[in-house]
Amino acid sequence: MKSFLRLLASVATTLLGLLLVTFVISRFLPADPVLAVVGDHASESTIAAARIRLGLDQPIIVQFWLYLKNVLQGDLGESIRTGLPISQELMRVFPATLELATVGTIIGVILGIPLGVWAAVRKDTYIDHLVRFFGLIGYSVPIFWLGLMGLLVFYVKLDWLPGPGRLDFGYEEMVVPVTGLMTVDTLIAGDMELFKNALGHLILPASLLGYFSLAYISRMTRSLMLGQLRQEYILTARVKGVPERRVIWKHAMGNILVPLLTVIALSYGGLLEGSVLTETVFAWRGLGLYITDSIFGQDMPAVLGGTIVVGAIFIVINMLTDVAYRVLDPRAR
């Protein structure tokens, strides 16, 4: 119970620090939210009235206290661009990012773990070098460039996959949003043509994020597996005549599952918060594109709300990983 309370206190402190840092940064940025509301040619009296209405005439400590109280009540303010509640807009766009990051992580796990194990077992062979080189490319090449090249090859040249967006133009109004996950909502509607269209739009951006996730997961799996393959219990199992497949996939893999869970969770959190460029290239109306559009529109309340949500998601993922770590590994308890 004490450890659980300490965990909650740690999460609360981290969230408070996140709120404070993001709020202070938003207030010292050169973009003026008042001018974004009233325009550059407004009179001084109009600007002053808008500043009072937005509470920007108060000391920054007072502004933060008022903002903190509103956030604790679930109120992230209103968007300057649309006038709608930011929390409502975030709930609308977040499922798109969730769908993209989840599929990308699944691809990374399904391919990254076997590749990492294979590279560790075949250490210093051409297979190991090939897997490491493949992962290095995933780390080194900018993901927006890969996205543009993917669209050029598979959409423009070969016409194998649909273009940007979550559905073809004209189809979007035909889907009734239930979960916000386009592939799930089209299945719920029972329209297989729309489902195939949504799946086609998902394949390329999710594969790019999956490649990025694969590069990280395969590298960490290889490192963790190499550490286990040097242990004495592995040598003992081999001397006893235990089949090599059982030695690798049961004994060694069983001992890296807990830290590997942390690796997968961090990769998932990274895709949730780091898919901004991918969403921009593919016009994927998710959280990343929402924050990008808000930045260009000088909509600082929306940028602040989106940043807080991204940080909170990452904190929650880390908290759940820590809990799972304690459950799965008795030594951590």
Image: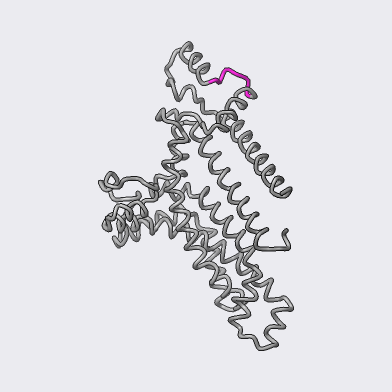
The answer to whether residue 131 is above or below residue 88 is below
Q: Nearer the viewer, residue 122 or 250?
A: 250
Image quarter in which the C terminus is found:
bottom right
Q: Residue at x 60, y 67 (%)?
A: 221
Q: Nearer the viewer, residue 221 or 69?
A: 69
The answer to whether residue 58 is above or below residue 119 is above
Instruction: Indicate the position of residue 152 as horizontal and vertical percent values.
Output: 35, 57
Instruction: Indicate the position of residue 302 as horizontal and vertical percent values.
Output: 48, 34
Q: Residue at x 62, y 72 (%)?
A: 253
Extreme residue in the front direction: 1
Q: What secondary structure prevails in the magenta region?
A: loop
Extreme residue in the top direction: 45
The answer to whether residue 183 is above or below residue 260 is above
Q: Nearer the viewer, residue 97 or 210?
A: 97
User: What's the magenta region?
Assistant: 55-60
Compared across the picture, whether 5 is left or right of 261 comes to right
Q: Residue at x 44, y 28 (%)?
A: 80
Quarter of the image for residue 5 reads top right
Instruction: Indicate the position of residue 134 as horizontal and vertical percent values.
Output: 52, 67
Compared across the picture, whether 297 is left or right of 231 comes to left
How many marks do you count on the picture? 0
Q: Is 58 one of the magenta-colored residues?
A: yes
Q: Is 14 one of the magenta-colored residues?
A: no
Instruction: Indicate the position of residue 323 as horizontal and vertical percent values.
Output: 64, 54
